[in-house]
Amino acid sequence: MIVESFKPSNKEVVDLINRLCHNPVVLDNRCIIRIYGSRGFYAFNTNKDVFNVLRLCVHPKWRGEGIGTLLHLDLLKLAEQHGKKKLQMIIHEESPALCWLRDCWGWRGMGVKQDYFKKRDGYIMEREIV
């Protein structure tokens, strides 16, 4: 499904998530969103060797049920199928997912982007595809 170029509001994203189930959606021919019912989604774009993860989100109702791990594993598999060498993501400095990325999923910190999130730092994280 191709969606016309737009900058979605939070409501538009939620509406999109509620309408789709497990279908990839391409925005602007650059951003791909893969949705898992109402449980969660991830969004990424690509360049030559890298999947740039824009979002990996689990609905609060489904947190602690392994949905994030399934999304992460699916993302790794998809990146590998497309011949990518690594994943990259910038994550909010106070995100509870930071420890999951680092301690459980094998991501490593590559640096800090000052004031990336409206006066809050973003951590540049990277994960090699093995």
Image: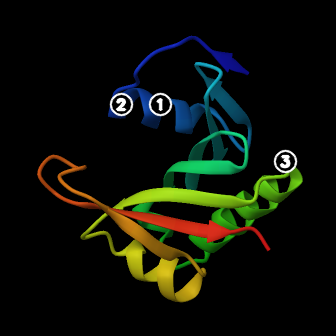
Q: Answer left or right for 92 relative to 67.
A: left
Residue 82 image label: 3
Mark 1 Cα-neighbour bin, 10 Å: few <14, some 14–19, many ≥20: few
Q: Answer left or right for 2 relative to 68.
A: right
Residue 66 place in picture, x, y as percent = 61, 77
Q: Nearer the viewer, mark 3 or mark 1?
A: 3
Is disc 1 placed on a helix, strand or loop?
Answer: helix
Residue 15 image label: 1
What amino acid is labelled 2 in the image?
Lys
Q: Report if the CB atoms under discs 2 and 1 are less than 8 Å apart.
A: yes
Mark 2 Cα-neighbour bin, 10 Å: few <14, some 14–19, many ≥20: few
Q: CA distance from mark 3 to mark 2?
A: 31 Å
What amino acid is labelled 1 in the image?
Asp
Residue 18 place in picture, x, y as percent = 54, 37
Q: Answer left or right for 84 relative to 126.
A: right
Please give the name of the residue rendered at 58% of the width and 19% of the height, measured from the top-left corner: 28
Please give the name of the residue rendered at 66% of the width and 39% of the height, measured from the top-left corner: 47
Name the residue that disc number 2 marks.
11
Viewer-closest of 129 and 12: 129
Is disc 3 placed on a helix, strand or loop?
Answer: loop
Mark found first going from the N terminus, 3 or 2? 2
Q: CA distance from mark 3 to mark 1?
A: 29 Å
Whether residue 20 is visible: yes
Q: Answer left or right for 103 relative to 36.
A: left
Mark 3 Cα-neighbour bin, 10 Å: few <14, some 14–19, many ≥20: few
Figure quadrant of the C terminus: bottom right
What amino acid is labelled 3 in the image?
His
Figure quadrant of the N terminus: top right
Quadrant in the picture for residue 33: top right
